[in-house]
Image (spheres, helix red, strand yellow):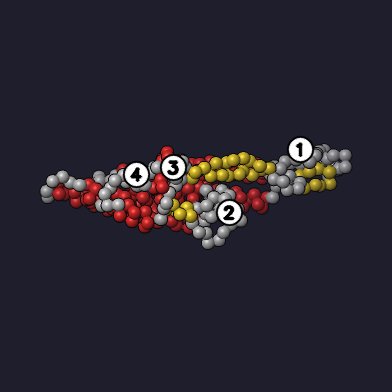
Amino acid sequence: MGFRSIAEIAGSAMAAQTVRLNTVASNLANAQTAAGSEAEAYRARKPVFASIYESSASEGAGGGARVQVLDVVESTEPLRRAYEPDNSLANEEGVVFYPNVNSVAEMTDMMAASRAFETSVEVLGRTRAMQQALLRLGQD
Amino acid sequence: MAINFDKTLGIHADALMLRAERTKVLASNIANDSTPGYQARDIDFAATLRRVAGDGEADDGFALDTGADLLYRVPHNPSQDGNTVEIGVEQAAFSQNASEFQTSLTFLNMKLKGLAKAIEGQ
C-alpha cells in the first residue's frame, strides 16, 4: 500500500490533462489560421492516452494504473477550403485553406479536461487528509 | 502475560490497510477517466476481508498481489471507446471509501486508548 503511489497516479492524470488542455488551446488559437496549401495548413491535434499498470512486484499489488500520453496525433478531417482571392496567402486559384478545428468540440473537450484535472486535485487533497489522519493515530 | 496487539486491534488494522489499497484502485479509475479502453476495477472488500480474517493467524498480512479480489466494474452505460469508468460512480465510491477509512482509524484510536488506560491502570 502506498499513499505515494496514489499521489503519482493523480499527478500523472494531471499531467495528461494538462497536455490535453494544451492541445485545445493550440487548436482554438489556430482555428482561423489560413494557409496557402493543404500541406501547410494547421490540423487539429489531439493527445492519445494510455494506462500503465503498476507492476505487482514493486508495490505488493497490481491495483494502480497511471496515465501516460502516448502521442499527439493530427486530425484527418478534411480542411475547410475558402475562395478568398484578396487574401495574400491565396494560391493561384484564389483558394486558402483553413484548419479542420471544430470549435464547439474543442470547447467541450476543454471543459471535460479541466473537470478531470479538478477531480485529480480533489483526489490528492482527500488522500493528504487521510495520510495526516493516519499520522495522528494514537495521539489523541 | 504480554499484550497481543494483533488480537487487541482485531480486524481494524487489516480493514484500514485494505481501505488504503482501495483508495489507490479508485484513484486509478478516476485518473483514467479519459483513457480509451481502460476498464475500471474495484476491490471486493467483503471477500478480501473475509479471506484475511478467515486465515486466523496474521501470517503475512495481505496477499493482494494474487489479484484475486480485484474485480472489473460493470458499467451502467457502456461507452464507445471501451472505457468503463463512470466518473460519478467512482467519485461516490472514493468519497465513501475515505469516510470508511476515517471510521477504521477512529476504531483503532479507541482500541489504542483502551490499551493506554489498561497500561496506566486508571
Quarter occupied by the N terminus of chain A: top left
Residue B88 visible in the displayed image: no
Dot 4: within a 10 Å radius of its alpha carbon, few (fewer than 14), some, or many (20 or more) residues? few
> Mark 3 — residue?
A56
In this view, the residue in front, A9 or A44, is A9
Looking at numbered disc 3 in the image, what kind of residue is underneath it? Answer: Ser
> Mark 1 — residue?
A40
> Mark 2 — residue?
B82
* Quadrant assignment, res A26: top right
Q: Are marks 4 and 1 on the same chain?
A: yes
Chain letter of disc 1 in the image: A
- Tell me the CA gap for discs 2 and 3: 24 Å
Chain letter of disc 4 in the image: A
**Residue furthest left as drawn:** B121
Chain letter of disc 3 in the image: A
- Tell me the CA gap for discs 2 and 4: 37 Å
> Mark 4 — residue?
A132
Looking at numbered disc 4 in the image, what kind of residue is underneath it? Answer: Gln
- Tell me the CA gap for discs 3 and 4: 26 Å
Q: Are marks 3 and 1 on the same chain?
A: yes
Looking at numbered disc 1 in the image, what kind of residue is underneath it? Answer: Glu
Q: Please provide percent x and percent y for residue A122.
A: 45, 48
Looking at numbered disc 2 in the image, what kind of residue is underneath it? Answer: Gly
- Tell me the CA gap for discs 3 and 1: 47 Å
